[in-house]
Image: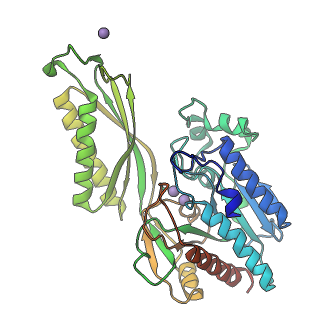
Amino acid sequence: MWRDLTPIGRNTTTNGYRRYAWTEADADCREWFRAQTETRGLTYEVDRNGNQWAWLGDPTAGDAVVTGSHLDSVPDGGAFDGPLGVVSSFAALDELRARGARPTKPLAIVNFGDEEGARFGLACVGSRLTSGRLSVERAHELRGADGLSLPQAMERAGYDPDAIGPDPERLARIGAFVELHIEQGRALADTADPVGVASAIWPHGRWRFDFHGEANHAGTTRIEDRRDPMLTYANTVLAARKKARIAGALATFGKVSVEPNGVNAIASLVRGWLDSRAADEETLAAVVGEIERAAVERGRRDGVDVRVTRESFTPVVEFAHDLRDRLSGLLGGVPVLPTGAGHDAGILSASAPTAMLFVRNPTGVSHSPAETAGEDDCLAGVAALAEVLEGLACH
Ligand code: GLV
Ligand code: MN
Ligand code: MN
Ligand code: MN
């Protein structure tokens, strides 16, 4: 499975993956998923929001045990974030069948669409639409750099954009959802355990900072006459780091766009996207508020107008305690850890009992081509997931 999947959407210069929602690379990943489903004689479904499902047992019976993750990537992402969960799900199902396990509940593997939000700016689009956390109106407003809206991109990829929307009937079929994922930090790296269980996801969000200045000639405009938004932006990046460090939170400007983007012109507009996360919502709100205040204050000095738009916010997720404890028990008491990364499991947790398994990442690096996991650890992840699926679906 890994051999067939890894060439798809890989940028050969960077070795990173560019599997953005509803592109050709994404279509190839989806075709891979469909083929895995067919090979195993599972029932294949694509739901109204473009998420793919592979069912063992009756999809409509209810109380299903669902596992899976996503196949899309961040710009130049690693091979494991997302795909490890999907590949492990098929492998765990194979393991259950090889053991002759007899599920008494339907089992499903899911590939949620557009988890990373690399193309339209909002993460977990597939699970948000399904759960009603993203409205159809807002989905129509989401636009990528090529100018296409999300529904337009879906239509070009052969999906019916008029079908998108909440899917309570599908959600109601889920008795439990377990997502296996590569760990995106180093909590397991220094332990003897290749697998851990998630306790919570930090609240997180994305804010767009628009710095409006005045375009002018780089060679003739006196320093004191400039209204340079790049300057305000640069100071805001520094302020973000400082405020986050003091609060024990995280703040990242990882994406920026500049107009008119000429070497010999002072910029007229700088847009920077802030990703911020913290252990609790109060701290997160306080940190983002402080960064915004620092930006506005600096903008006043620079003659730059600063406007901040919250593009998304995901509240803290506390995974279902009984399911988490059950998993930890089934796996013989593995470490339980929180994470700062968002996941479809976090979105689904409002609708169904949800849990996550993390597979050790020796360097902790993620959202980068350097992301890696050892083969033995990946196999331990598959074994753990098989154990969990058997425990949840066969008894
Ligand atoms: C998803 O990977 C996120 O946390 O940004
Ligand atoms: Mn990710
Ligand atoms: Mn992921
Ligand atoms: Mn000139």
Residue 228 is drawn in which quadrant?
top left
Q: Nearer the viewer, residue 324 or 235?
A: 235
Q: Is residue 173 visible?
A: no
What residue is at 23 percent from the left and 42 percent from the top? 293
Q: In the rendered view, does 131 fall on the left or right side of 212?
A: right
Relative to residue 57, is residue 36 depicted above or below? above
Relative to residue 327, is residue 366 depicted above or below? above
> Could you say where residue 130 lies in the image, as x and y percent from the top left?
65, 53
What residue is at 16 percent from the left and 30 percent from the top? 301
> Could you say where residue 92 lies in the image, as x and y percent from the top left?
70, 75
Q: Nearer the viewer, residue 36 or 281?
A: 36
Q: Is residue 79 visible?
A: yes
Q: Nearer the viewer, residue 29 or 102?
A: 29
Q: Residue furthest left?
A: 224
Relative to residue 286, is residue 54 depicted above or below? below
Q: In the rendered view, does 44 fall on the left or right side of 370?
A: right
The image quadrant in which ligand 4 is located: top left
Residue 102 is drawn in which quadrant?
bottom right
Q: How many marks?
A: 0
Judging from the image, the colouring scheme is rainbow
> Could you say where residue 104 lies in the image, as x and y percent from the top left?
79, 81
What residue is at 36 percent from the left and 65 percent from the top? 279
Image quadrant for the C terminus?
Answer: bottom right
> Could you say where residue 132 lies in the image, as x and y percent from the top left?
61, 52
What residue is at 21 percent from the left and 59 percent from the top? 246
Relative to residue 237, is residue 268 depicted above or below? above
